[in-house]
């Protein structure tokens, strides 16, 4: 993300793109990566909680 900000900032300064185009690009980038980040965090929570659930629930029928 930092790389996009640096490169995009230079492009805005040199008038290659407008500030609006740069903000729109960053917004679309965030909208693309946000669900991916949320899914990976959910999976990490699931993986860390699975052993605790297995050890705290009694076995049924045995």
Image: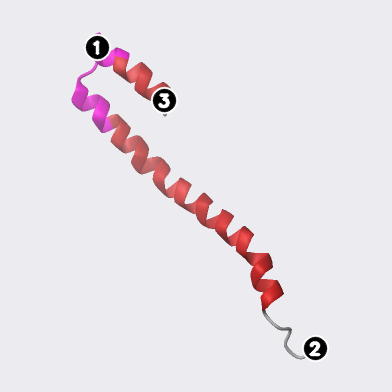
At a point 64% along the width and 66% down the height, the residue shown is 50
Vertical position of residue 2 compared to residue 27: above or below:
above
Tell which of 3 and 15 is nearer to you: 3
Q: Which element is circle 1 on?
A: helix
Task: Examine the image and state in which quarter residue 14 appears.
Answer: top left
- Residue 12 percent location from the top left of the image: 25, 16
Report the disc number at residue 37: none
Q: Earlier in the sequence, mark 2 or mark 1?
A: 1
Q: Which residue is mark 1?
A: 13
Quadrant where the image shows the N terminus: top left
Part of the protein shown in magenta: 10-24
**Dominant secondary structure of the magenta stretch?**
helix
> Seen in the image, is 28 located left or right of residue 41?
left
Q: Which residue is mark 2?
A: 62
Q: CA distance from mark 2 to mark 3?
A: 55 Å
Mark 1 touches mark 3? (CB < 8 Å): no
Q: Report crowding for label 3: few under 14, some 14 to 19, many 20 or more residues within 10 A (C-alpha).
A: few
Answer whether residue 16 is visible to the viewer in this image.
Answer: no
Q: Which residue is mark 3?
A: 2
Q: Is 8 in the magenta?
A: no
């Amino acid at each position: 993300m930092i790389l996009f900000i640096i490169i995009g900032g230079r492009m805005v300064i040199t008038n290659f793109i407008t500030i609006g185009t740069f903000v729109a690009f960053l917004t679309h980038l965030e909208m693309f990566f946000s669900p991916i980040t949320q899914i990976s965090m959910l999976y990490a929570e699931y993986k860390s909680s699975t052993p605790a659930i297995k050890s705290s629930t009694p076995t049924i029928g045995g």
